[in-house]
Amino acid sequence: MTVEIPTNPVVLQRWPDLAVPRGLRAGVSARAVDLLVRRLTRRLPLAVSYPDGTVTGSPTAVRLVLHRPDDFAARVGTAGLIGFGESYMAGDWDSPDLVGVLTVLAAHITDLVPRPLAGLRRLHVAGHPAAERNSEDNTRDNIARHYDLSNEFFGLFLDATMTYSAALFTGPADDLAAAQHAKIDRLLDRAGVRSGTRLLEIGTGWGELAVRAAARGADVHTVTLSAEQRVAARERVAAAGLTDRVRVELLDYRQVSGSYDAVVSVEMIEAVGYEYLDSYFGTIARVLAPGGRAAIQAITMPHDRMLATRHTYTWIQKYIFPGGFLPSVRAIGESVTRSTDLRVREEFSMGPHYARTLRLWRERFEEARPEIAALGFDETFARMWRLYLAYSEAGFRSGYLDVGQFVLGR
C-alpha cells in the first residue's frame, strides 16, 4: 500500500520534512543513489522491484518494492539514511518482509557505500541540533517527545507489566510478561536488592521494577523525566499497596542526592549522550554507598561504528529518540574507569532476546492499528513507528546491535 504524501497539503503541514527534495543537488544525487541501489542488488541478498515490473537482484532474495523510485532516490541522495527513513514514511517504498530487508542492510552496514564515498560522509550528513544535546536544560524535552506520546499508546503494544526494554526469555514458551519479570529479577539479584536495601532507580519507566523491588522489602527512590510515566508509575505503586516504600520523582539523574546501597538503571544510558557518559557514571558512583553495587541494562553497538557515527544525526534521533546515543561495551568500560572508582565486574549479553521482544511488540502494534488511529495518530506516524520497531529488530537479528546487563562495583 502506498501513502499519498508528497503532494498532500494536510500531511505536509504536519510532516513538512516529507516534501520531496527538488533542485540540482537532488537531481544529481538521485542518479547516484539509483546506480548505488542497482549495485547493491548485485552484491547483497536483496532484490528491488520497480513500478514498470523490473526486478534487480535475485528473485529469491528479500524484496524492497519501490513505488516512487525518483522520490526515493531524491530523498536518500539529499539526506542519506534520514532520507531513507523519510521515504518509507512517505510511502515511496515498502516490503513484504520489512524486517528481512532491514536485517540485510544492517548486516552489511559498512559495505553499503563505496569506501571512497564513505570518507566524505562527515561532509554530507547532518550534525546534531544544539537543542537536542542532553544538557539539563534540554533533556526533559527530549524525553517528553518520546515517552509522553501517551500512556494509552504504549499500553497498546507493551505487555501488562508496561516494561519498555529487552525481556529475558528462559524458554520458547515464555510469555512476554514472564520474560520481563525474569529480566527485572536478574538485575535486582545482581545489584543485591533485598529487604532493607536503599535502592535508586535511574529511569522509572512505568514502575514495574520499582514495584518488584519494593515487594522484596527495598526502599525505592526512582527518578524520571517523563511526566506521563510518573503518573502511571505512581498509580501502579499505589495499586500494589507500596506507596510507603516507593518514591517516584520527576528529577534529572544529575540532581539526585543521598546514599544508596544499590543503583539500577534499565536502558536509560541511551538517553544520556556521548558527552555525558562520565556524568551518568559519576552520578552512580557519587550516590553508591561503600560496598554497594550498580546494575545497568544497556543497548550497545560495535566500538568502531560508535566512533564513526557518534556525531551523525540519524533518522532515529530526528523522529524517535531525540538526543539518543548507543555506546559500545568498550565506551562503557572506559567511561566507568575514567570517571569513577567503580569497575565493570560482570557483563551479560542478551541481544537475541531483544530481537524476540521487538518482534512481539511489532506484532502487537500491527494488531492495535485501529486503536492507535483512534488515539489521533495518523498513517504517517504509524509507518514511522513500524519502521522504528522493524529497524530495531533487524539490528539485533543481524548482530549489529546487542543489549547487556553490566554490574558495577568498587
Image (spheres, grey):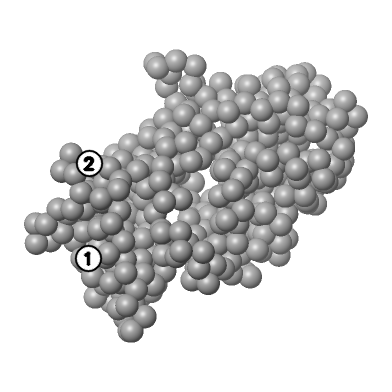
The kind of secondary structure element at disc 1 is: helix
Residue at 54% from the left image edge and 28% from the top image edge: 350
Q: Which residue is mark 1?
A: 69
Q: Which residue is mark 2?
A: 61
Query: At which x and y percent is residue 89?
Result: 32, 60
- Please tell me which residue is depicted at 46% across the width and 50% down the height of the picture: 110
- Give the residue type at disc 1: Pro
Q: Give whichever of discs 1 and 2 has the lower sequence position.
A: 2
Q: Residue shown at 32%/77% (left/top)?
A: 28
- Left or right of residue 145, residue 71 in this image: left
Q: Is residue 104 left or right of residue 210?
A: left
**Which amino acid type corresponds to the residue marked 2 in the rendered image?**
Ala
x, y (%) of residue 195? 77, 18
Which quarter of the rendered picture does the C terminus lie within? Answer: top right
Of 160 and 331, the residue lying toward us: 331
Task: Give the residue at x 38% y 33%.
Answer: 360
SS type, badge 2: loop
**Residue that extends furthest to the front in the rendered view of this protein:** 116
